[in-house]
């Protein structure tokens, strides 16, 4: 039946075109945002999971930054400790030389003074982020012998856990201005401290030669402590590095997981877009044809 008031074909064509336009807008939104799930309306479950994972990733990013800061601090301290080993080795070598009779010990002391000054300068300069683990004052109210570096973050059943790597700097302190308990300013077994050794007044007497031998022993003991401290710092550096690598890998895994949930497949969306463009054009043509049927009714009255 040909009806002037109701054009069923046009209504059907319009509904089809409207549906096509709606799908077309969805695909365009996915292409413009890069997400197939950009709001909870798109997929509430996936959106909720993705938002939780993004929150965890932000926390992990903060952990990664903290680990980087801790690693930089450890690098600074470790570099200073390595330099200290070389200088103490130099002092030890000069002391071995002066155990021989007839050596001008006052002159050699002048050569020892410079390394001693360098040791203090290196310890005082080993500062990063206002932290110095080599030159301290344990009587200071802000002093804390235990330093912490953030190691990891986890969220399990709503419970947040932050792991911290603890480092006891009493093992690394070279100078302690409060009580001279640092490796270099404390008296070793024979009563000598590397920082204050002075051989300028010693003679070739048996007693003085015995004192010199004691100095060599004490410097050697201090050197062993410094190497132990360097070993501890090296182990901490390795631990922080491994944690940093793990956090970085975990962050990447979370990013990939979020992508699997919410990212749009651009190859697929491009194919959909092209198909919808064709459907849109055909829908417009179908609507145009359906609307022209009303004009055909006029021919019945001509």
Image (spheres, helix red, strand yellow):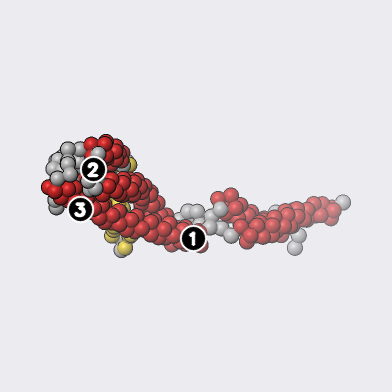
N-terminal of the pair, mark 3 or mark 2, is 2
For the residues marked 1 and 3, what is the alpha-carbon distance in whole angstroms? 59 Å
N-terminal of the pair, mark 1 or mark 2, is 2
Q: Is residue 146 visible?
A: no
- Residue 233, label in figure: none
Q: Which residue is mark 3?
A: 217
For the residues marked 1 and 2, what is the alpha-carbon distance in whole angstroms? 74 Å
- Mark nearest the camera among 1 and 3 is 3
Quadrant of the rendered image containing residue 53: bottom left
Q: Which residue is mark 2?
A: 102
Q: Residue at x 38, y 52 (%)?
A: 64
Q: Is residue 16 left or right of residue 136?
A: right
Q: Is residue 204 left or right of residue 230?
A: left
Structural crowding at the residue carrying mark 2, measured as other residues with C-alpha within 10 Å and reported as few (<14), some (14–19) or many (≥20): few
Q: Say which element carries label 1.
A: helix
Q: Residue 272: horizontal and vertical position, in percent?
A: 65, 60
Please say if 93 is above or below 272.
above
């Amino acid at each position: 039946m040909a009806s002037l008031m109701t054009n069923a074909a046009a209504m059907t064509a319009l509904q089809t075109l409207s549906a096509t336009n709606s799908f077309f807008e969805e695909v365009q939104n996915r292409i413009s945002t890069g997400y197939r799930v950009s709001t909870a309306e798109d997929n509430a479950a996936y959106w909720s999971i993705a938002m939780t994972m993004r929150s965890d990733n932000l926390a992990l990013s903060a952990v990664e930054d903290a680990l980087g800061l801790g690693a930089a601090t450890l690098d600074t301290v470790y570099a200073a400790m390595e330099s200290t080993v070389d200088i103490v080795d130099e002092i030890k070598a000069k002391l071995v030389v002066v155990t021989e009779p007839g050596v001008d010990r006052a002159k050699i002391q002048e050569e020892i003074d410079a390394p001693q000054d360098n040791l203090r300068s290196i310890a005082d300069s080993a500062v990063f982020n206002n932290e110095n683990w080599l030159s301290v004052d344990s009587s200071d109210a802000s002093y804390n012998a235990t330093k912490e570096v953030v190691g990891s973050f986890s969220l399990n059943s709503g419970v947040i856990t932050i792991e911290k790597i603890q480092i006891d700097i009493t093992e690394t302190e070279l100078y302690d201005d409060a009580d001279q308990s640092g490796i270099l300013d404390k008296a070793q077994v024979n009563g000598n401290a590397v920082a204050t050794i002075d051989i300028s007044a010693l003679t070739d007497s048996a007693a003085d030669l015995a004192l010199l031998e004691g100095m060599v022993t004490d410097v050697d003991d201090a050197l062993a402590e410094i190497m132990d401290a360097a070993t501890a710092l090296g182990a901490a550096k390795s631990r922080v590095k491994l944690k940093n690598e793990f956090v970085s890998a975990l962050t990447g895994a979370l990013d990939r997981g979020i992508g699997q949930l919410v990212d749009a497949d651009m190859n697929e969306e491009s194919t959909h877009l092209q198909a919808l463009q064709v459907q849109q054009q055909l829908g417009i043509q179908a609507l145009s044809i359906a609307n022209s049927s009303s004009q055909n009714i006029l021919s019945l009255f001509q």
